[in-house]
Image (cartoon, rainbow, N blue to C red):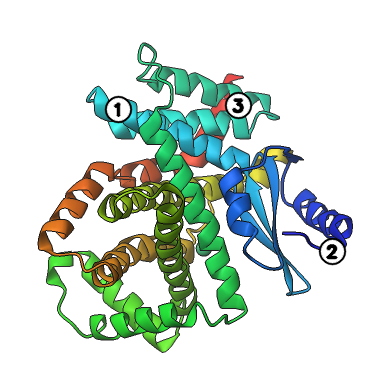
């Protein structure tokens, strides 16, 4: 997409990024993302490599949008998938594997703070389970990464379309609201401890109260993204429809799980950046329940909604659904223990103190 006054716009994007994190521009371009964005007006993509490892949207004049695409986020995502794949293939403990991987990420994230970085590197080595199992990426992982990127781009486009109240997005919104309405009053005891959260969230979404508005926006963006990803995949790769749906849902399962874990831990540490940088006394921050609830609701409820809608659109029968759910189970990574450990305030403060004493 050609945008007028490109240099002026990019100057403003860079200025805004400078205030957020260390980063460098990247000259790598992603072919499929460019292909998608060429069809979208007033939206462009800016590739960076940042220490924050986070994608974002910059809105300029409420009219032009720049999607900031962080190559580092995707590099870590691929490393994570390789780690999970190794653990599954060699029957190793996934929680340990992912924790070790996250320490390697934290060691690079804080590579300008010698004590912390060395400490993390040491833990990464001690916990590492794949010394002898170094494995490269493979075709399955490459496909998951590509589909996840396409999904993530469409997710951001889904946000943009909601901001401009685009006609294309309104049916998705109505569909989600129609689905949530009965949830808030129905019995969902099979969801066990999730029942209360899901019913409460459904109530907030339908009434637009508390965080309902934001959760709704995330779910609509996800739903829009998965439908668009399936369409795009079919157009480009022309595979059999059922296989396309399975591949897309698997990528969704991986990327949404990773995103939740990675951003929860990353932002828990970022809360302490100031203290770390200036050697200030550490204080435990209170947990941001909003972020947590948003992520959990998006993952848990969003997943169910997506399955339900795809079942309707593509006329999937019970046998298809069983096969899809079995395949999704294989991709499921339980992130609870990893998050409870690495995003725990007491753990973070103790780790920073120990790093300062040791190095
Ligand atoms: Zn989003």
| Residue occupying the point 37% across, 41% down | 338
Q: Is residue 263 above or below residue 78?
A: below
2 vs 1, front mark:
2
| Residue occupying the point 35% across, 20% down | 129
Check disc 1: other Cα within 10 Å, few if <14, some if 14-19, many if 20+.
Answer: many
* Helix, strand or loop status at disc 1: helix
1 vs 3, front mark:
1
Which x, y percent locates residue 138?
A: 39, 27
Which x, y percent locates residue 136?
A: 43, 21
Query: In the picture provided, is 52 more to the left or to the right than 332?
Result: right
Q: Which corner quadrant holds the C terminus?
A: top right
Label 1 to label 3: alpha-carbon separation:
25 Å
**Can I make out residue 55 in this image?**
no
The residue tagged 3 is: 117
Check disc 3: other Cα within 10 Å, few if <14, some if 14-19, many if 20+.
Answer: many
Q: Quadrant of residue 145?
A: top left
Which x, y percent locates residue 202?
A: 33, 79
The residue tagged 1 is: 87
Label 2 to label 1: alpha-carbon separation:
49 Å
Q: Which corner quadrant holds the N terminus?
A: bottom right
The residue tagged 2 is: 4
Of label 2 and label 1, which has the lower sequence position? 2
């Amino acid at each position: 997409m050609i945008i007028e006054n490109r240099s002026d716009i990019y100057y403003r994007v860079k200025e805004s990024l400078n205030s957020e994190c260390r980063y460098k521009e990247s000259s790598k371009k992603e072919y499929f993302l460019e292909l998608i964005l060429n069809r979208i007006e007033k939206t462009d993509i800016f590739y960076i490599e940042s220490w924050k490892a986070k994608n974002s949207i910059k809105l300029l004049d409420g009219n032009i949008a720049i999607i900031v695409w962080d190559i580092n986020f995707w590099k870590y995502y691929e490393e994570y998938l390789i780690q999970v794949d190794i653990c599954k293939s060699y029957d190793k403990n996934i929680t340990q594997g992912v924790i070790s991987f996250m320490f390697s990420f934290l060691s690079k994230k804080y590579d300008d703070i010698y004590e912390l970085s060395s400490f993390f590197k040491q833990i990464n080595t001690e916990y590492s389970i794949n010394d002898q199992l170094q494995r490269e990426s493979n075709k399955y992982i490459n496909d998951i990464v590509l589909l996840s990127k396409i999904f993530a781009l469409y997710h951001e486009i889904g946000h943009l379309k909601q901001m401009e109240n685009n006609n294309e997005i309104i049916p998705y919104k109505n569909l989600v609201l129609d689905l949530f309405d009965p949830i808030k009053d129905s019995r969902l005891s099979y969801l066990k401890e999730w029942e209360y959260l899901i019913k409460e969230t459904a109530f907030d979404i339908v009434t637009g109260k508390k965080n309902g508005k934001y959760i709704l926006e995330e779910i609509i963006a996800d739903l829009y993204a998965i439908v668009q990803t399936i369409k795009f995949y079919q157009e480009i790769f022309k595979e059999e429809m059922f296989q396309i749906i399975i591949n897309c849902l698997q990528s969704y399962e991986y990327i949404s799980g990773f995103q939740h874990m990675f951003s929860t831990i990353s932002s828990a540490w970022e809360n302490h950046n100031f203290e770390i940088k200036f050697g200030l006394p550490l204080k435990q921050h209170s947990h941001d329940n909003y972020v947590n609830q948003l992520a959990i609701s998006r993952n848990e409820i969003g997943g169910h909604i997506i399955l339900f809608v795809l079942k309707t659109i593509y006329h999937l029968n019970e046998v298809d659904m069983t096969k899809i759910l079995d395949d999704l189970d294989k991709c499921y990574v339980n992130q609870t223990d990893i998050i409870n450990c690495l995003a725990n305030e007491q753990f973070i403060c103790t780790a920073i103190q120990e790093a300062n004493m040791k190095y």
